[in-house]
Amino acid sequence: MDAQKVTLRKMTPPEYDAATEHREAETARELGKFMPEELARERAHQGTAQFLPDGLDTAGHHLVVAENEAGEVVGNAWIGPDPRRAAGTAGSAWLYDINVFPAFRRRGYGSAVLCAAEELVVREGWTSLGLNVSGDNEAAIALYRRNGYDVESMSLRKSVRQAPGINS
């Protein structure tokens, strides 16, 4: 299969609304593994408000759609400053979200969107691109590894319950 190529362009307001709805639903689904559903939805919404206070026009953030060579929108991405770094610290960008639409998955577009995102990062003067991925998202982990991403840190969790008859 030939490598896919995509071009990134700024989202339109309706594209932003759809991407935000999808991202918040996916975030709530992931958070729902660890907290009540209503709280997970609220946290997802709060994350958008915190990191994108001006929505589509939030300074330093790039909310983009990826178009293939035929002009079809195949996915989207959100790239901005690394939230783990102090404000004004140059060098590190963050891939807050990446999405390849179902009809275009398993066809090389994930790698193409990552490549285009990396090119945007270089144009903006950043020197690295970080991201988080859920540990059970094997397809995404494989995509990132194929594209040269290394594990920088790892968090683990185990649910434990107090044994009957033990007082705390």
Image (spheres, grey):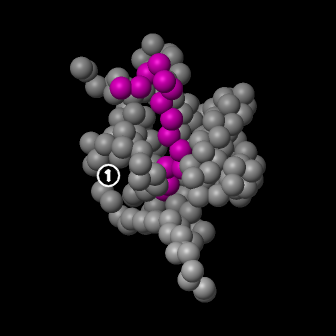
Q: Is residue 13 above or below residue 138?
A: above
* Quadrant of the drawing holding the C terminus: bottom right
- Magenta includes 103? yes
Q: Would you identify the image quadrant in which residue 140 lies?
A: top left
Kindly identify the amino acid type of the residue bearing the numbered disc 1: Tyr
User: From this viewpoint, is residue 146 visible?
Assistant: yes
Quadrant housing residue 81: bottom right
Name the residue at 41% across, 48% down. 136
Relative to 28, 39 lies left or right: right
> Please, what secondary structure does the residue beneath circle 1 have?
loop
Nearest the viewer among 62 and 103 is 103
Find disc 1 in the rendering and name its residue.
149
Quadrant, the N terminus: top left
Residues in magenta? 93-106
Residue 137 x %, y %: 42, 45
Pick whichever, 56 or 30, lies toward us: 30
Badge 1 local density, few (<14 within 10 Å), some, or many (20+)? some
Q: Quadrant of residue 20?
A: top right
| Residue 35, percent from left and from top | 64, 58
Percent coordinates x, y for residue 88 in the rendering: 58, 68
Residue at position x 36%, y 43% in the image: 138
**x and y, in percent, of residue 44 in the image:** 68, 51
